Image (spheres, rainbow, N blue to C red):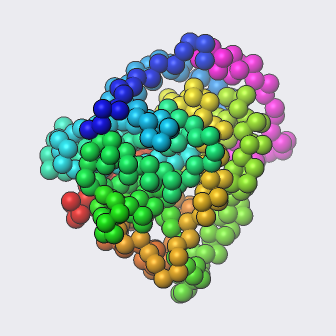
Amino acid sequence: MSASLRPFRIDVPDEKLDWINARVSAYPWYEPPGGPRDDAWAYGMSTNWLKDIARYWQNGFDWRKAEAELNRLPQFKTTIDGLDIHFVHLVGEADGRRPLLITHGWPGSFYEFWQVAEPLAFPSRFGGKPEDAFDLVIPSLPGYGFSGKPDKPFGQRATAALWDRLMRDVLGYATYLAQGGDWGAMVTSFLGLNHGTHNEKGGCKAIHLNMFGLRPTPAAPQNDDEIAWLQQSQANMQAEGSYLFQQMTKPQSLALGLMDSPVGQAAWIFEKFNTWSDLRGGALLDIYSRDQLLTNLMIYLVNDAFATSVVYYRAFAEEGGGALPENTRCETPTGFAKFPGETVYGPPPRSWIDRAYNITHWSEMSHGGHFAAMEAPNLFIEDVRNWAQGVS
């Protein structure tokens, strides 16, 4: 393990918290379009829902309590190529023998994995088997959370190279497993593609995804199921993809509009939790607590990280996107967990994914959506364990 590791504890200055509270308190609310609607979220963020959250934010939410909970797991920082990287490093019952790197996406954070971290690291404490334990490494993406802010767009390929150095050079793991969803799925895919042990260019033995990332070339559908999926995917982007194009093309305009408004950032982020979560069994607050949603949001606010988080989309375009070279695929053994509530980014048919990845584990879940580890932690834990049994 490298001597460059620095233990880290979250300790947000009172002045920052006071500023956030003052801005929330002073927010001048704007009424939604008039007329009766059955769906309060029909025009985007529900104003009444957010007003309720703001009241709790002011009168019930305790950041210091959330901060203490976050500090309960060991965290560190290290510097690689001049960029500070923040990460949780939870050495479990595996005691160094089974490292698992887990990467979050937007608008999530390392906190997405709070419910699954200890069961994955210490399964015998939660009714599991010690042999299923992992050493967990859960970093904050560059420009997110408590990681440093790159001075130019820094994308998913570059992050994968950074993570490989973190795991091997800094933490001393010769080989490791990797998991991810959202941007984490793309970073994890590039770990498998460019830093897999199969090509002797890295230490990633196998990957597990709960959102597809890389696309085969050519990307033309080859059967009726793929045609239907592609049509649905295009319709999803037409209805829900405006945020993606804004953040990929003009992120700074969005950042300048929202960086001064905690309520504005809350609206932008919470609307995605509502749209991307599996709500078939209830409303948003039936799945997440107010404290969970606000803790994740505050990780953006206390670090002024919103601007650099959305630039990460522009970096994706500048790096060349996720299309594979023709007649190639990610040969690193890949597990895929299909969560049915992943609607906007619904996974392609197995035949499509097989052209992009060496699929060795495939599972279809009963419930859960985009934020799988938060929405369906028990299913997430079980599938990660089952996948890893076949590769480590």
Q: Which residues are magenta?
A: 17-45
Task: Identify which residue is drawn at 67% across, 63% down.
Answer: 237
Task: Please give left or right for residue 230 compared with residue 341 in the image.
Answer: right
Instruction: Tell me, yes or no, whether the highlighted magenta stretch contains residue 319.
Output: no
Question: Which corner quadrant holds the N terminus?
Answer: top left
Image quadrant where residue 374 sits: top left
Task: Identify which residue is drawn at 30% across, 42% down.
Answer: 171
Instruction: Tell me, yes or no, whether the highlighted magenta stretch contains residue 44.
Output: yes
Percent of width and height locating residue 248: 69, 54
Q: Is residue 2 visible?
A: yes
Task: Identify which residue is drawn at 53% across, 35% down.
Answer: 148
The front one of 64 and 13 is 13
Q: Residue furthest front?
A: 81
Image quadrant where residue 229 sits: bottom right
Task: Please give left or right for residue 193 compared with residue 16 in the image.
Answer: left
Percent of width and height locating residue 131: 14, 50
Magenta portion: prevailing SS class: loop
The front one of 231 and 11 is 11
Q: Residue furthest bottom?
A: 223
Q: Is residue 371 visible?
A: no
Task: Identify which residue is drawn at 60% across, 18% down.
Answer: 16
Percent of width and height locating residue 247: 69, 50
Task: Please give left or right for residue 166 compared with residue 319 in the image.
Answer: left
Question: Which corner quadrant holds the C terminus?
Answer: bottom left
